[in-house]
Amino acid sequence: MAITSLTNENYKQEIEQSTKNVVIDVYASWCGPCQMMAPIFDELAKELEGNYKFAKLNVDEARDLSIKFGVTSVPTFLFIKNNQVAGRETGYMDKQDLVDAIKKYLG
């Protein structure tokens, strides 16, 4: 299972050139709900990796990308379809809620 760590430098290659729809976990190391979401995100990445690309974006390390996406709170999940943000969800979600959001926005 490979979860891509996004940076300002690799975003174009990893996301814009991806042939799969992408789920991005926007997080911060100091964020409690983000830490609670991490194992859920990791688990889904293993279960669904054939269907979607999974990536993580640290707001403190990739500030430009956070601004580009208009992220104002963490955790935020971005759902990228055809290089466009198809949807976003903010805040802690349990596993089923995250699966439902992925299906809702990415099919």
Image (cartoon, grey):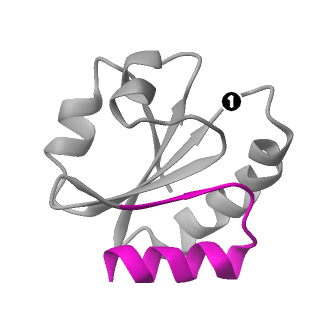
Q: Residue 33 location in percent, x, y?
A: 81, 47
Q: Residue 12 location in percent, x, y?
A: 19, 32
Of the 4 image quadrants, the one containing the C terminus is bottom left
Q: Which residue is mark 1?
A: 28
Q: Nearer the viewer, residue 100 or 12?
A: 100
**29 sits to left or right of 90:** right
- Assess whether residue 54 is covered by the magenta stretch: no
The residue located at (45%, 28%) in the rendering is 66
- At numbered mark 1, what does the secondary structure look like: helix, strand or loop? loop
Q: Nearer the viewer, residue 29 or 45?
A: 29
- Assess whether residue 100 is covered by the magenta stretch: yes
Q: Amino acid at mark 1?
A: Ala
The 10 Å Cα crowd at callout 1, few under 14, some 14 to 19, many 20 or more, is some
Residue 7 sits in quarter: top left
Residue 105 sits in quarter: bottom left
Q: Specify the segment rendered in magenta.
A: 87-107
Tally of numbered tags = 1
**34 sits to left or right of 71:** right
Q: Residue 21 location in percent, x, y?
A: 28, 64
Q: Residue 70 location in percent, x, y?
A: 42, 35
The residue located at (74%, 54%) in the rendering is 37
The residue located at (25%, 43%) in the rendering is 15
Q: Vertically, is 10 above or below 9? A: below
Q: Vertically, is 19 above or below 58? A: below
The residue located at (83%, 52%) in the rendering is 36
Q: Vertically, is 77 above or below 28? A: below
